[in-house]
Amino acid sequence: MMHKHVGQIILSIAFMLGCGMLMPPLAAQGRPQGVEQRLKNMKEKLSLTAEQEATLRAMFTKSQERMKALRDSLSGDRQSMRKAALEEMQRIDKEIQKTLTDDQKKAYEKMKQERRQNRPTESRKYN
């Protein structure tokens, strides 16, 4: 009897893991990217130097920590959270711009434009 339940549990776990592997990555679902994925994308499209990559990694990690603290402190207040998130995104964008060369800034602006166009229509109404 115990073996039957163990088998069912194993099958259930295998099924859930399989379903998770079939789901599209978070970025494809319109969700924020992790620090490393964001860096990988920027490195490929902007040809970042090792120094730029290190600077941006530290910047994104700090920003992620700030956003977590904001979410924790503003939980339940969606309007304040949205405002704080927008301010953080604008702040980090200015910092990114300071790190890039002129050519990279042009490519970065193009990346942002493409990202805006590929966003789900629901999130476009907040621009």
Image (cartoon, rainbow, N blue to C red):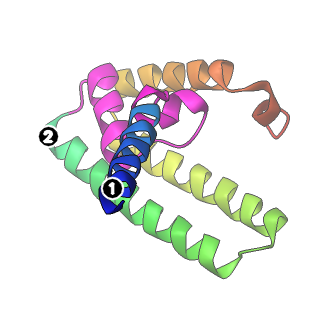
Label 1: which residue?
Answer: 6
Marks 2 & 1, CB-CB < 8 Å contact: no
Camera-near label (2 vs 1) is 1
Residue 69, percent from left and from top: 54, 76
Residue at the image point whose x is 73% and y is 65% from the top: 81
Q: What SS does tag 2 mark?
A: helix
Residue at image mark 2: 50
Q: Distance between the Cα atoms at labels 2 and 1?
A: 49 Å
Q: Residue at coordinates 49% horizontally, 27% vertically from top-left?
A: 24
Relative placement, left or right, of 100 versus 87 is: left
As drawn, the residue found furthest toward the left would be 50
Disc with the residue nearer the chain's start (2 vs 1): 1
Q: Where residue 38 sits in the image (x, y, percent)? A: 38, 38
Tell me the quarter of the picture where residue 74 sits: bottom right
Quarter of the rendering containing residue 65: bottom left
- At x 43%, y 45%, the residue is 12
**Is residue 1 one of those drawn in magenta?**
no
Residue 4 pos. (x, y %): 36, 52
Judge from the rendering whether residue 108 lies leftward or rightward of residue 89; answer left or right.
left
Quarter of the image for the N terminus: give it: bottom left
Between residue 126 and residue 22, name the one nearer to us: 22
Instruction: Give left or right: position of 114 versus 106.
Output: right
Decide whether residue 25 is among the magenta residues.
yes
- The three-letter amino acid code for the residue at tag 2 is Ala
Q: Residue at x 35, y 29 (%)?
A: 41
Q: Residue furthest bottom?
A: 73
Which element is circle 1 on? helix
